[in-house]
Image (cartoon, rainbow, N blue to C red):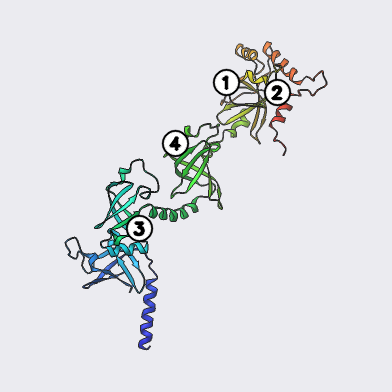
Amino acid sequence: MSESEEDFAAMFEASIKTRRFTQGQRIEGTIVAIGPDVAFVDVGGKGEAVIEVAELKDDEGDIEVNVGDRIQAMVVSTAGGITLSRALTRGAATLRQLEDAFNAGLPVEGKVDGEVKGGYEVRIARQRGFCPYSQIDTQRSTDPSQHIGQVYKFRIIEYKDGGKNLVVSRRALLEEEQRAQAVEIRKSIVPGAVITGRVSSVRDFGAFVNLGAGVEGLLHVSEMGWSRVLDPSQVVTPGEEITVKVLRVDEEGQKISLGLKQLSADPWSNVGATYEVGQVRAGRVTRIAEFGAFVELEPGVEGLAHASTFPPTGRANGWTKSVSAGMTADFEILSVDLEKKRIGVALVPEGAARGIEDGVSEATVVPAAKPVARVERQTGPAAQEREDVREYAARKSDAGGEGFGSLADKLRGALKPREK
């Protein structure tokens, strides 16, 4: 091989080694020689890098390392070889190094000395810089003084007057780190995964949960509990750490839907074994609609008392006078649809309720959320009163109009999905 070919091979090998490193990468190497101006650092294999001797001196000007010592430094250039800077990992020591860091977008270390108007004064080696409040973190702090005295990495976003006027940002670096971490975090967020996050905010419609690196998911109010949740703030609070289940992931829109109730047993899993038509259960009216009243029979199990099941008053919507949200009463089970998770109920008239207390009711009262026995038919004044109500609801109109129909038919019609 000729001399020129050997030189080319050596240059090619050096080029390959250089490609192993990227600008801004932090590496570790061993000092192999110290010259008047630069020192040579072994960075693995036959690769060597250079670093200025000035960066290896202490505050008194003495070289604080020896041949054979290992140091950590940052790659500031790969053009024509690998150039390292140790000062950038501790705080740039010279204006030239600050300018290099600004042009290359490399981070520098600085100490937050104190607050000034609009932000903080940051000491970067022998220089002073300014960091606006909005650039010290990704979130505005309620206590700005918590950053004073801290040593952070900053990016120089403005370099003026030969380095005497510096504006730095810590937020820019944090956001870059978050974007890199977010890519990895999103890979682990798949439907069915159970993960831990922190509540970032609570709204009327639910709560946003930070899953890490700024990746947020929505915990909708309907997914917070098996029972109807009216106020999300009663379930979760900002800053609280919670465990949730991933329900859906919209890859295109990067929307993540979360669930909390899915981590507990579905109360409807026992409805088939504990609820029977004809039973009377204690319930609480949760809300009133135009077509009827919704009744919570136990946490997570809700029934519908259709308007047609209430005794008529002779006025439109007059039935609403006998029922109100929050009231508790006894309700008879009229129908149970396990597939659609629907239960039809009817309010037990007050007279029947008194009969129940006297032990002469038509049906056995079953307290909510407790196992029940098969209903036994009974007789008595209360039973006759209930039968009168049923007959009234089923009676045809003498004027030839449409009759009320049976309670069951009416309820099925109310529960049937509306045709589009």
> How far from the left and from the top, in percent, is residue 138?
40, 48
Is residue 160 positioned above or below 233 on the image?
A: below
**What kind of element bears circle 4?**
loop
For disc 3, the marked residue is: 158
Is residue 394 positioned above or below 267 on the image?
A: above
Q: CA distance from mark 4 to mark 1?
A: 30 Å
Label 2 crowd (10 A; few <14 / some 14-19 / many >=20): many
> How far from the left and from the top, in percent, is residue 360?
64, 12
Q: Earlier in the sequence, mark 2 or mark 1?
A: 2
Q: Which part of the image, by quadrant, shows the N terminus? A: bottom left
For disc 4, the marked residue is: 237
Q: Nearer the viewer, residue 349 or 177?
A: 177
Is residue 278 positioned above or below 29 on the image?
A: above
Label 3 crowd (10 A; few <14 / some 14-19 / many >=20): some
For disc 1, the marked residue is: 328
User: Label 1 sits on what residue type?
Assistant: Thr
For disc 2, the marked residue is: 308
**Taking 305 as reference, is 107 left or right?**
left
**What kind of element bears circle 3?**
strand
| Residue 408 quadrant | top right
Q: How many marks?
A: 4
Marks 4,1: beta carbons within 8 A: no
Q: Nearer the viewer, residue 215 or 122?
A: 122
Residue at the spot 67% in from the left edge and 19% down from the top edge: 318
Is label 2 or label 1 in front? Answer: 2
Is label 2 or label 3 in front? Answer: 3
Q: Earlier in the sequence, mark 4 or mark 2?
A: 4
Is label 1 or label 3 in front? Answer: 3
Q: CA distance from mark 2 to mark 3?
A: 73 Å
Q: CA distance from mark 1 to mark 3?
A: 67 Å
Label 4 crowd (10 A; few <14 / some 14-19 / many >=20): some
